[in-house]
Image (spheres, rainbow, N blue to C red):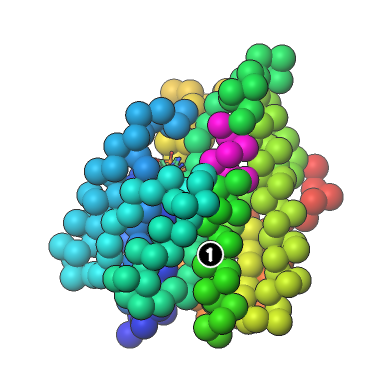
Amino acid sequence: MGLLDGKVAIITGAGNGLGEAYAKLFAREGAAVVVNDLGGARDGSGADRSAAQKVVDAIVAEGGRAVANGDDVSTVAGGENILKTALDAFGRVDILVCNAGILRDRSFANTSEEDWDAVIKVHLKGTYCCALPVWKWMKENGGGSMVLTSSTSGLYGNFGQTNYGAAKAGIYGMVRVMAIEGRKYNIRVMGLAPGAYTRMTSDLPGRQGREPDPLSLPENVAPGVLFMVSDLAAEHSGKILGVSARGVREIKMVETE
Ligand code: ADP
């Protein structure tokens, strides 16, 4: 008996780090998983679609069910094809975790138009592109749960991340509106602020060279996200939940820490 028995989950950017940890845990909990990842470097260059397949191979080796998808989340066609991958392989979708992301950290003065567009496109437009087709399917098929990855960077700010912070604050806005609209269709939408030390956060100013905090490794964040997508969180929608090995807590916009 797993928490996600009989469910189908799509996880974007699941070839590395957090998404990989979610995919492996969800599969262990009984879900069939679509592992999406375009692959490549942290700044979004050099697509390498083998990342998703490696995670699928590891899940299948453990006796789980998973299928790889290498589409770009930041295009409408990519989002539609990710849903198609789920429907072709497993016939339905119950859970979406929008996790794919890139970083182009620069001080505001040094943020080029290209850095701005690239980060907004993958995070903010990418969340729209992936969530919309799944939303339409869930609306006609009894609902489901979505976790859209936001960040404390979008709520409190973080040096060198105007583009990323803007995208993550925008995702918070999406969560609020989609949760209101989703009530009618039994679609729960939650924002996630992962307290994780990952490939994406390990290069942030002030963090280079620091040892990862074991409490914040992706494997320790994944159980909180499992809670969010499962029926255990049936009462939660429209919130940003901060998740680390220290637990799950609601994050309010007014906090300033
Ligand atoms: P974190 O663990 O903090 O989420 P990672 O960089 O390890 O950070 O994971 C983000 C994932 O998102 C990477 O595996 C990356 O390949 C993937 N990704 C980035 N851009 C896209 C995109 N446009 N479409 C699909 N996946 C993407």
With 14 as the anchor, is 227 left or right in this view? right
Residue 38: where, in percent of width, then height? 37, 43
Which of 197/91 is in front?
91
Range of magenta residues: 118-124
With 49 as the anchor, is 253 left or right in this view? right
Is 121 part of what is drawn in magenta? yes
Q: How crowded is mark 1: few (under 14 residues within 10 Å), some or many (20 or more)?
A: some
Residue placed farthest to the front in the image?
77
- In the rendered image, the quadrant that contains the C terminus is top right
**Residue type of the residue flagged with mark 1:** Pro
Ligand 1 placement by image quarter:
top left
Residue placed farthest to the top in the image?
110
Residue placed farthest to the right in the image?
254
Residue 39: where, in percent of width, then height? 35, 39
- Residue drawn 37% across the image and 72% down it: 87
- Residue drawn 61% across the image and 31% down it: 117
SS state under label 1: helix
Answer yes or no: is residue 210 visible.
no
* Quadrant of the rendered image containing residue 69: bottom left
Residue to which mark 1 is pinned: 133
Q: Is 246 located above or below residue 137 in the figure?
A: above
Residue 1: where, in percent of width, then height? 33, 85
- Residue drawn 41% across the image and 77% down it: 92
